[in-house]
Amino acid sequence: MKDDIKEILFSEEEIQRRVKELGAQITAEYAGKAPLLIGVLKGCYVFLADIARCIDLECEIRFITASSYGLSSITSGDVRIGMDFDFEISGRDVIIIEDILDSGVTLTALKSFIEKRSPASIKICTMLDKPERRQAPMTADYTGFMCPNEFVVGYGLDYAERYRNLPFVASLKPEIYS
Ligand code: IMP
Ligand code: MG
């Protein structure tokens, strides 16, 4: 698996340090509240597991799925959302936890889906942000790192369902895609 890597962009140590900072910031900003963390599967699973343990507040943790139709590395713009409707969003302080903000299409759809359910507040926390690829005007409230305009894997992010378990974020050698 590690032979497929071109370059490590964010090391395990850098990520852990940044996740602790974000967790501390959220803890301070939501003091006295019990935020509802909604993770966007599947890419969020590592980031959510780490950041949730750095948030020193009572949290409720739920998941949502969002997939766009089409090829693995291209967003088609048509987002399919899936959720178990066994939890209340109404009146809650929602923080959406996402792996990467890329075109912005997924988060735009998710945010409006959640907004329709009357949360008290809604914020977005993303591990990575690739602003150069934006198609929909979307910004995150909490961002781990700005990411260069390259396809990356690791720390939850996949290419064809592989590499999610790498503890760092890396780019892949071009021959992997061909
Ligand atoms: P958006 O709708 O284009 O912002 O897409 C976001 C989703 O596309 C993310 O949640 C990822 O699942 C996927 N994605 C975007 N860029 C990458 C990448 O560089 N590596 C792996 N997955 C990515
Ligand atoms: Mg994702």
Image (spheres, helix red, strand yellow):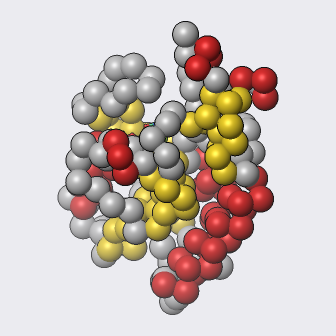
- Quarter holding the C terminus is top right
Left or right of residue 116: residue 100: right
Left or right of residue 21: residue 64: left
Please report the residue visible at 55 percent of the width from the left and 61 percent of the height from the top.
Answer: 144
Is residue 110 visible to us here?
A: no
Which image quarter: residue 122?
Answer: bottom left
Please report the residue visible at 60 percent of the width from the left and 56 percent of the height from the top.
Answer: 48
Residue at the top extreme?
178
Q: Nearer the viewer, residue 8 or 103?
A: 8
Q: How many marks?
A: 0
- Quarter holding the N terminus is top right
Q: Nearer the viewer, residue 2 or 104?
A: 2
Relative to 58, residue 112 above or below = above
Please report the residue visible at 24 percent of the width from the left and 67 percent of the height from the top.
Answer: 118
Relative to 110, residue 90 above or below = below
Which image quarter: residue 173?
Answer: top right
Relative to 111, residue 104 above or below = above
Residue 54 x %, y % = 67, 71
Relative to 156, residue 129 above or below = below
Please report the residue visible at 49 percent of the width from the left and 36 percent of the height from the top.
Answer: 150
Residue 92 x %, y % = 37, 72
Is residue 17 visible to us here?
A: yes
Left or right of residue 127: residue 76: left
Residue 60 x %, y % = 54, 66
Q: Nearer the viewer, residue 129 or 62?
A: 129
Quadrant of the displayed image that contains ligand 1: top left
Residue 77 x %, y % = 25, 33
Residue at the bottom extreme?
32
Q: Nearer the viewer, residue 151 or 162?
A: 151
